[in-house]
Image (cartoon, rainbow, N blue to C red):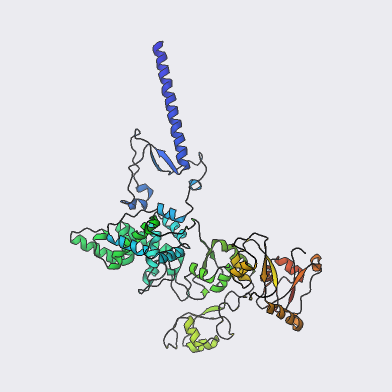
Amino acid sequence: MRMRSRAVFFLLCLIIGASQSSIAVAEDNYAAFTSGFTFTQNEPEKQDKQEEPSKLNKPDEQRSTSLEPAERQLSLRPAEKISSDILPLKLESLKNDPKDLWERIRSGFQLAELNSTLVQEHEAWYANRPDYVQRTMERSQRYLFHIVEEVEKRGMPTEIALLPIIESAYNPKAYSTSHASGIWQFIPSTGKHFGLDQNLLYDGRRDILAATDAALDYLQKLYNMFGNWELALAAYNWGEGSVGRAIAKNQANGEPTDYLSLRMPPETRNYVPKLIAVKNIVMNPAAYGLALNSIPNSPYFASVKLEQHMDVAVAARLAEVPLDEFVALNPAYNKPLVAGIGKPTLLLPVDKVNSFSLNLENNERPLSSWQTYTPRRGETLASIAKRFDISLARLKEINAISGRNKHVAAQTLLVPVTKSGNAPTLLAHIPQPEPATGRNVTHIVARGDTILNIAKRYGMSAAELKSHNGLKSNNLARGQKLTILTSNKQHMEKTKVARNQPEAAKALKVAKNSAAKGKHTRYVVKRGDTVFSIARRFDVAVNDLQRWNNIPASNNLRPGNILRVYDRES
């Protein structure tokens, strides 16, 4: 009986011990899961990422799945699979992604250090040029998040996202003596091989989305050919044929075939050391006396498909972004026209997409002052210039035609849409704000308003707007009232037009409603005005403006029409 009691007691101890062990493991698993990891008792041998980067690009089924003895100590590995019925949350939703994109980039570095004095030489070169580094990094912030996303999707080292620093200093318009173009510096033939269209209006080598895809496709192909990133990068610079021949030559001589052992031109010899130098600076900029401004770990731009072509300046105006910013995001368009094969795609700052869509929807002006034209057989440049009422010199300039060529053979030309003097400037048909001197107008801050876009709307600088309103910062509150100075000359012209307007341009009849007796402003319609632009200028609803002035649904306005715009408080 005593022996049986001891056995029962021993069995209970075993059960309790096992339960406690299970509870401890379960608790550890949950804690590890919330930090993006899970514990395992059967982990494969740990691999060195730098020595075997190929593991990153091989399919999962090619990775080792051998199990180790259960007695092995618990170890930590990235979480791979969690049962959805136990924990329905997606793993991505629990990631603690860094707010700074540089931290994300640092965490993805994989390239091994290079035993070369060239690395130190390039580190010193960058360290001695802080202004150059700053300009390059400022340009990179537009594109870097997108490139890092694409690099990580392919399991590539994040050093690849720094490659445009070496290639082009992240200048989207960079053009080399060997005719390489864009931030990834594709030469024409390689660009065409990877599907980058190049024509009069559009150069895919400068298209941020298309060129990034092509560059990463090419680099993956080179990595698969040569088996390591140093040789793949050398081939990206020198060409796979050249690297292949250099390897074959070393093999024939019984020499090593690693990057440092190959005979190559000086540019290629410095190529990888330069990238490693940039990587080291990004990893610890303070060690080189440099500072990297924080870049948000979030998208900088979004893409928008257009249903029709439009002028570059019109697109920038509709998006409410400066022209240079628009061109930096859309450098692929060679001419002052957003056009290409199929429906053109625009990249816009993420916070401007809604503004662009709304402005485009309410736009009542022509979107383009240019069109493409294919000359007929035997047609001369002079006759085309005469036909479209543009000077011969301007026609040749806009179409990059040099020399004394009189004829054009099967070449698409860019010509004005209308015959109204010389080719119109891009901003000719876009209403421009008037100089800010004279009477005061009150602007009520609406959602999405900024100091810059309000100042632009009224033709004044941001500094002037802030000075007139005693603002010490760019922060605005919705509903805040700002004082805007309008032109005295404009006010005089309104009075003159009101006295002398033709019958067709007489004042529109004002609707009799409750607002008609309130405080209001008389506004004389100018050339280029639309119901939408006037409503926006005075921060009133379009339908209110139509109702107050009996404006028909067609929204037709003529210069000289007089509108009444009632104050919000009326």
Residue at x-position 64% and y-position 61%? 447
Q: Is residue 514 above or below residue 5?
A: below
Q: Quadrant of the N terminus?
A: top left
Residue 276 in which image quadrant? bottom left
Foreground pick, 154 / 495? 495
Q: How far across and down, in percent of the image, does residue 180 sit?
A: 38, 71
Residue 311 seen in render = no
Q: Is residue 93 above or below residue 301?
A: above
* Residue 427 shown left or right of residue 29 in the figure: right
Q: Is residue 66 above or below residue 411?
A: above
Check the image and name the residue furthest to the top: 1
Q: How far across and down, in percent of the image, does residue 113 sit?
A: 31, 55
Residue at x-position 42% and y-position 27%? 18
Foreground pick, 337 / 483? 483
Residue 20 in which image quadrant? top left
Q: How far across and down, in percent of the image, does residue 212 sit?
A: 43, 63
Residue 262 seen in render = yes
Foreground pick, 550 / 59? 550
Q: How far across and down, in percent of the image, does residue 337 sit?
A: 52, 75
Q: Quadrant of the C terminus?
A: bottom right
Check the image and name the residue furthest to the left: 253
Q: So how many labels did they put on this image?
A: 0
